[in-house]
Image (spheres, rainbow, N blue to C red):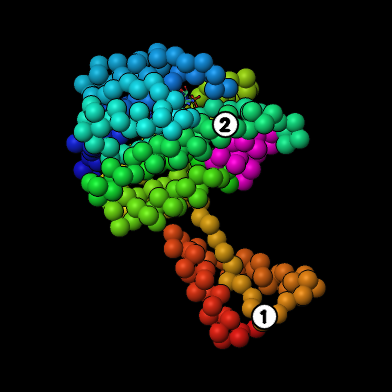
Amino acid sequence: MDELRFDGRVAVISGAGRGLGRAYALLLANRGAKVVVNDNGSAILGEGEDEGPAQQVVREIEAAGGEALASVDSVATCEGASAIVQSALDAFGRVDILIHNAGNVRYGALDEIAVEDFHSVLDVHLMGAFYLVRAAFPHMKAQNYGRVVLTSSIGGFYGNQACVNYAVSKSGMIGLSNVIALEGEEHGIRSNLILPGAMTRMADGLDTSQYPPLGPELVAPMVGWLAHEDCALSGEALVAIGGRMAKIDMLETHGVFQPHWTIEQVAARMEEIADPATYADLGLHGYRAHLGQSFEMARNGRL
Ligand code: NAD
């Protein structure tokens, strides 16, 4: 296969001053993309600002012969996210690729977490994603082209203890990505989720001595593919961790039809209702397939 390149493409990558985002920025720039390296340089909990990380990555890209621009606005406000996208338009004239990767973490059990900590994580991850997409989408539509990669997490799909804020943000990414995929379809815009795993500062304090190599550079090729014009996937979720690449699907059983139900009948037929042998992936247009399936059963009166 010929080398997959990004010449002429402009990528906005949030949280690209460190960790995973930095690896994405270096890879895309190395393959010819012009990159807006966005990072407000905040600490792991989300507080403070530091221009250093974004500028350092820009220097690395330039030293390797690439083109990049540092942006230190926060994704957590509508104005900040708009300024990030605008900086790509001002410097490079377009925005083809949006990778929302910026993130903070704040822990707390369900009955203890401070409301402020809940909002803080939602603001960076989920609201940040929405603000960035809102700013970039009209430009992608106008040019009939766009690739969006939003960062979800195993915690968003399966849950995680003591970080409901993170789980909610990362599962919210599923709905957002699917809407981008649906609304962007006719405009050449594709949107997918990355569920990464890598040793970054997010692992600070953990005993990682027994872990295999988990570098961010093991995640970047999957994100690179999702960001590439040859990739036609949309509305999908891909996992990349420690060299393992996988795909997560949303599945629905075939279902059971009765014209009327009682609680007891639901209880009695639960095994059939949830029969894993009948699972199907209804895909991006699942809601249509889902409605069609329900209507077909209702019409046919199938028991
Ligand atoms: P990281 O802390 O190394 O990098 C995150 C970057 O985001 C930091 O440089 C930080 O300054 C920046 N940032 C934070 N708030 C910002 C804001 N408001 N505006 C702009 N930039 C901001 O973390 P990482 O491990 O590289 O994580 C990257 C993404 O991957 C996050 O969304 C994280 O939730 C997700 N993720 C990571 C893992 C993992 O194993 N590392 C697992 C699942 C998901």
Q: Quadrant of residue 20?
A: top left
Q: Residue at x 59, y 67 (%)?
A: 253
**Tag 2 residue:** 121
Q: Secondary structure at mark 2?
A: helix
Does the magenta portion include 4?
no
**Tag 1 residue:** 258
Give the numbered dot on residue 93: none
Name the residue at the right extreme: 264
Magenta residues (range): 158-170
Q: Secondary structure at mark 1?
A: loop
Horizontal relation, residue 9 to residue 263: left or right: left
From the image, which quarter does the C terminus lie in?
A: bottom right
Q: Is residue 236 visible?
A: no
Q: Amino acid at mark 1?
A: Gln
Mark 1 Cβ and ligand 1 under 8 Å apart: no
Total numbered badges shown on the rendered structure: 2
Task: First in sequence, mark 1 or 2: give its number.
Answer: 2
Dot 1 crowding, Cα within 10 Å, few <14, some 14–19, many 20+? few
Question: Could you tell me what secondary structure mostly forms the magenta stretch?
Answer: helix
Q: Are marks 1 and 2 in contact (CB under 8 Å)?
A: no
